[in-house]
């Protein structure tokens, strides 16, 4: 008897999957490692821009090539593994009110800081000389806040981009 097996659960463990993953990793490494090297070289700004753009486009092309090499079974396998990991360790759908409030503060602080920092750069210690740590810290805080806020917040963000989305508030009884 032959058993039917779900192709998304079985690894497409062959040379195509291995080569596809290698090409995909290369598509990430090439721009991340290559652009800092190009910017450190003694070249004209136009040449640095051209080479950096070429590395970015090359990384994108390699990413598409990786999917083509893996073919659909390999792509479905990788996708199922990544989304399975995110589902297991990702944010819960519902969170407590205090966790939501903390997450909302974590979400708003980097956005407000980004707006205010332009006008108050002279009053923020070290910001004018070295803004990158502030930018990285704000980005990290914003990303972490999305996990703290939970899955329902992701739906609220998504609703911003859906024209027909409607807001429905739960009716609560407040006893005075």
Image (cartoon, rainbow, N blue to C red):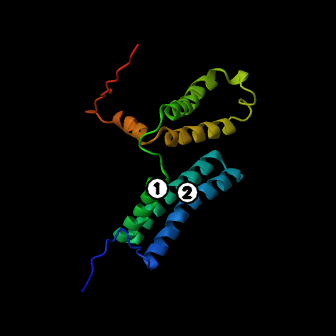
Picture coordinates of residue 101 (x, y %)?
A: 51, 30
Q: Residues within 10 Å of mark 2 (few under 14, many from 20)?
A: many
Q: Residue at x 67, y 39 (%)?
A: 132
Whichever of labels 2 and 1 marks the residue nearer the N terminus, that label is 2
- Decide which of 115, 55 is in the foreground and name it: 115
Residue at the disc numbered 1: 88
Left or right: residue 80 versus residue 25 is: left
- Decide which of 32, 167 is in the foreground and name it: 167
Which marked residue is nearer to the observer: mark 2 or mark 1? Answer: 1
Up-down relation of residue 31 to residue 1 (above or below)? above
Q: Secondary structure at mark 1?
A: helix
Q: Secondary structure at mark 2?
A: helix
Picture coordinates of residue 95 (x, y %)?
A: 46, 38
Task: Check the picture and name the quadrant holding the N terminus.
Answer: bottom left
Q: Residues within 10 Å of mark 1 (few under 14, many from 20)?
A: few
Instruction: Please identify the quarter of the rendering in which residue 143 is found.
Output: top right
Total marks shown come to 2
Left or right: residue 65 versus residue 47 is: left
Left or right: residue 79 versus residue 148 is: left
Q: Residue at x 40, y 62 (%)?
A: 80
Picture coordinates of residue 65 (x, y %)?
A: 43, 66
Q: Residue at x 64, y 39 (%)?
A: 137
- Decide which of 143, 127 is in the foreground and name it: 143
Residue at the disc numbered 2: 55
Residue 38: which numbered mark, if any?
none
């Amino acid at each position: 008897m032959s058993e039917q097996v779900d192709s998304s659960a079985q690894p497409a463990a062959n040379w195509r999957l291995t080569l596809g993953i290698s090409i995909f990793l290369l598509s990430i490494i090439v721009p991340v490692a290559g652009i800092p090297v190009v910017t450190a070289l003694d070249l004209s700004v136009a040449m640095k821009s051209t080479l950096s753009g070429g590395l970015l486009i090359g990384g994108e092309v390699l990413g598409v090539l990786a999917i083509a090499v893996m073919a659909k079974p390999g792509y479905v396998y990788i996708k199922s593994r990544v989304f399975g990991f995110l589902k297991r360790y990702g944010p819960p759908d519902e969170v407590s009110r205090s966790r939501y409030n903390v997450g909302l503060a974590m979400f708003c602080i980097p956005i407000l800081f980004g707006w205010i920092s332009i006008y108050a750069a002279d009053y923020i210690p070290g910001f004018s000389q070295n803004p990158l740590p502030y930018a990285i810290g704000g980005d990290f805080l914003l990303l972490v806040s999305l996990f703290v806020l939970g899955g329902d917040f992701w739906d609220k963000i998504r609703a911003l981009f859906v024209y027909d989305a409607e807001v429905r508030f739960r009716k609560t009884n407040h006893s005075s």
